[in-house]
Image: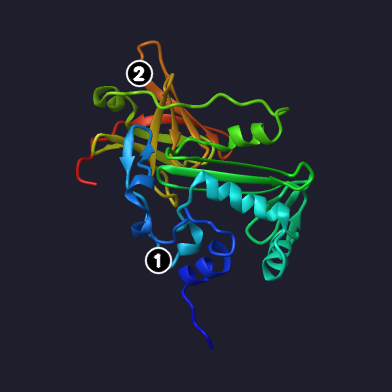
Amino acid sequence: IESNSYSQLITEKILQPLNLTETYMQLNDVPTSQLAQGYMGNKLTQAWQFKALAGAGSIRSSINDLLTYGVAYLTQPEGNMKAAMALATQTHYQENKLRVGLGWHINSNGIIWHNGATAGFSSIIMIDPKQQKVVAGITNRNDNVEDLVVHLMNPEYPIKENDFPVDISIEQSKNYIGSFEQADTGQVTRIKLIKDRLFMETPKQPKYGLTYIGNDTFKLNLVAVKLKFNKNNSDEVVGLELHGWGKPQKYTKTSSLAIDKTD
């Protein structure tokens, strides 16, 4: 039985047949001149290294190769590649309006798409067989690039307001640290300042870094969630509202926390 690594299979079965010359399976293989620096807010990030989870985000590519890959789905190369592409874009799971192929989401109008992100990087590709159109977007920030790509695919969808990072000093950040409790559930969320950066800690959830976007509002890195802090007439934080995980969740500040310089 022939045994090949994941990298070998991707290279031999996809990259070489489609002539994707700017796509790399290993971070060390990317020419320095082509490797973008990642950012989370105003902070530099390290590109992630993958081992067991290589299939979830190890591939590094350029916008040219991403578009070339999408065009291949429209032109449907002959042979095994054509059969594989057809299989991947069939609906393999459906629940209400949700349709999923093999690695692809499928819209009701037939557009196939997939997105992804690691710390400091985000990407999406959309393919519309009806329009014979491919749109892709990549960014070396943790900002959402999907909004722009959806608009380019269909201009009827307006571009939403982007939440760009806003500079915030350490002294200003200290105003938001504390312990916050949700009245309905008793769940406690803590906002901590760790090594000069704010983080949100919630039970049974990973620790999320916060990026300030102005007006007492922060967005969580890697997920589409925002925190809006509420203040009293003395400009003191008394609570927060979390938007993005179901209906808005309101929390009341119950105590202040010490600044943590050890984590």
Picture coordinates of residue 209 (x, y %)? 37, 40
Mark 2 vs mark 1: which is more N-terminal? 1
Classed neighbour count for the residue bearing mark 1: other residues with Cα under 10 Å, few (<14), some (14–19), many (≥20):
few
Quadrant in which residue 172 is drawn: top left
Which residue is outermost to the top? Answer: 233
Please give the name of the residue rendered at 39% of the width and 61% of the height, measured from the top-left corner. 26
Residue identified by numbered label 2: 236
Q: Nearer the viewer, residue 254 or 86?
A: 86
Mark carried by residue 66: none
Q: Is residue 115 visible?
A: no
Quadrant in which residue 212 is drawn: top left
Label 1, secondary structure: give it.
loop
Image quadrant containing the N terminus: bottom right
- The amino acid type, in three-letter code, at marker 1 is Lys
- The amino acid type, in three-letter code, at marker 2 is Glu
Label 2, secondary structure: give it.
loop
Q: Is residue 13 above or below residue 261?
A: below
Q: CA distance from mark 2 to mark 1?
A: 46 Å
Please give the name of the residue rendered at 32% of the width and 24% of the height, measured from the top-left corner. 168
* Left or right relative to 199: residue 63: right
* Left or right relative to 160: residue 208: left
Picture coordinates of residue 137 (x, y %)? 55, 40
Picture coordinates of residue 54 (x, y %)? 45, 63
Mark carried by residue 51: 1
Q: Nearer the viewer, residue 161 or 237?
A: 161
